[in-house]
């Protein structure tokens, strides 16, 4: 009897669980992702949005609200983000929380709906490519006359049909879009993503590479590894860190750079120059492959090389610096006579001495001075053997003689 009662209790608990689970699931609130698009639109922003869109899709989000406040940005980044927005099946809402200019306007128009705050603006739809050139977006309604870019206020955007409504704040937006009962998931870039966005900015990349090149050039003038080298390598480390976090570079590009750097360092121990050249090419290739845009990276590297050359010229010409690294590659020490070095014994004590030629001088030959045979050269022409000659000049190993009638001393 007692056992039957226990089984009845267990059955009741089990049935209660089965009934409660679908009810809990049915009344579970949906998720709405609130994602900021602030500051400049660049490739680092695309990497951040790619992560958040993927998370929203995995959690079956009901909507994605893009909180837009940006002056614009770069055409390649805006194009990639727009394709990301077009590819998702989730409802996308552009909440223009002040200004959506240039690339910001371009992105807003790729959302399913646009809502604006009362003092918000949208327009000026001309965005910049990676080379710094302006590229006009095909937004004909934004143009008032040929070539004139137009910026619309919140009321004007609603009037022409771009905006679905004007909202006073984010809560008002949720009410007008019927999302008040949803769980709001606010996504912010991580610390590493913020650094990556800064580092991968097309304006920052050439500055970072210039700092790296200048630091390494200054290190060539230092007798030992010091602060300039640390700064240069740190700049390169930041470059690869930012591009890896942003998803532009992988470990293979970092490995390629490390191998290239190792080959350059090996050049100090392996003669020939081929190893160093190969290492330099691998370093350049790794930088190009790590960048978000190949042409942008080539321009950035070119700028960095110019900065390095200018820095080297300034250090050598105005500060009189010498490349200490050459001491490991080239023998720069000179054995000059000023420092007490001679190429051979200078026989100045022979000046004025007389001897006899052992061989004809044509004009070089051999003479005998006492019991010593000496290689000599005649001052003029031919001198026959067994003739007396006087030593008139000694220039290191070159001893000049002249025929004379004076007999040699016995």
Image (cartoon, grey):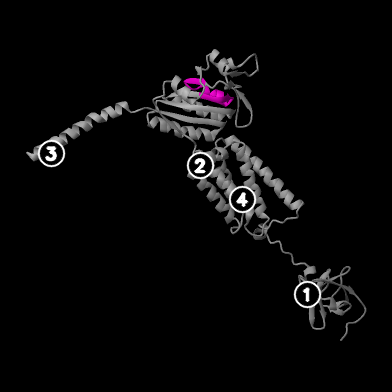
Question: Which mark, by number, is residue 231?
Answer: 4
Viewer-side label of 2, 1: 2
Is disc 1 surrounded by few (<14), some (14 to 19) or many (20+) residues within 10 Å?
few
Q: Residue 111: say if magenta.
A: yes
The quarter in which the C terminus is drawn is bottom right
For marks 4 and 1 on the same chain, the one whose residue lies earlier in the sequence: 4
Residue 159 drawn above or below residue 254: above
Viewer-side label of 3, 4: 3
For marks 3 and 1 on the same chain, the one whose residue lies earlier in the sequence: 3
Viewer-side label of 4, 2: 2
Residue 331 appears in the figure? yes
313 vs 63, nearest the viewer:
63
The answer for how far apart the CA atoms under marks 3 and 1 are is: 118 Å
Is disc 4 surrounded by few (<14), some (14 to 19) or many (20+) residues within 10 Å?
some
Callouts 3 and 4 close, C-beta under 8 Å? no
For marks 3 and 2 on the same chain, the one whose residue lies earlier in the sequence: 3
């Amino acid at each position: 009897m007692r056992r039957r009662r226990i089984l009845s209790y267990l059955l009741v608990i089990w049935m209660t669980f089965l009934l409660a689970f679908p009810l809990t699931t049915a009344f579970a609130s949906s998720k709405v992702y609130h994602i900021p698009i602030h500051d400049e639109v660049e490739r680092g922003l695309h990497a951040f949005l790619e992560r958040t869109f993927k998370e929203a899709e995995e959690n079956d989000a009901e909507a994605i609200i893009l909180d837009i406040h940006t002056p614009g940005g770069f055409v390649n980044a805006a194009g990639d983000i727009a394709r990301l927005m077009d590819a998702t099946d989730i409802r996308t809402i552009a909440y223009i929380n002040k200004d959506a200019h240039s690339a910001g306007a371009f992105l807003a128009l790729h959302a399913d709906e646009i809502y604006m705050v009362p003092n918000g603006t949208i327009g000026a739809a001309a965005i910049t490519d990676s080379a710094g050139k302006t590229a006009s977006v095909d937004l004909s309604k934004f143009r008032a006359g040929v070539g004139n870019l137009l910026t619309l206020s919140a009321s004007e955007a609603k009037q022409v049909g771009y905006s679905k409504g004007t909202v006073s704040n984010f809560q008002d937006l949720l009410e007008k879009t019927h999302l008040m009962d949803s769980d709001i998931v606010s996504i912010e870039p991580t610390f590493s993503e913020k650094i990556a966005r800064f580092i991968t900015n097309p304006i920052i990349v050439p500055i970072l590479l210039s700092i790296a090149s200048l630091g390494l050039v200054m290190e060539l003038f230092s007798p030992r590894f010091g602060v300039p080298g640390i700064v240069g390598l740190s700049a390169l480390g930041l470059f690869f860190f930012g591009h890896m976090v942003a998803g532009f570079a992988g470990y293979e590009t970092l490995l390629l750079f490390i191998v290239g750097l190792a080959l350059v360092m090996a050049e100090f121990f392996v003669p020939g120059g081929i190893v160093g050249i190969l290492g330099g090419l691998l370093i350049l290739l790794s930088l190009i492959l790590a960048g978000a845009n190949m042409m942008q990276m080539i321009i950035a590297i070119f700028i960095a090389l110019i900065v390095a050359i200018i820095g080297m010229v300034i250090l050598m010409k105005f500060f009189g610096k010498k490349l200490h690294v050459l001491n490991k590659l080239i023998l720069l020490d000179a054995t000059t006579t000023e420092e007490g070095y001679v190429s051979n014994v200078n026989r100045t004590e022979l000046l004025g001495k007389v001897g006899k030629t052992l061989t004809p001088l044509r004009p070089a030959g051999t003479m005998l001075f006492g019991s010593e045979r000496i290689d000599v050269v005649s001052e003029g022409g031919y001198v026959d053997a067994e003739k007396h000659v006087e030593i008139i000049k000694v220039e290191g190993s070159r001893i000049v003689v002249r025929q004379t009638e004076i007999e040699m001393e016995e």
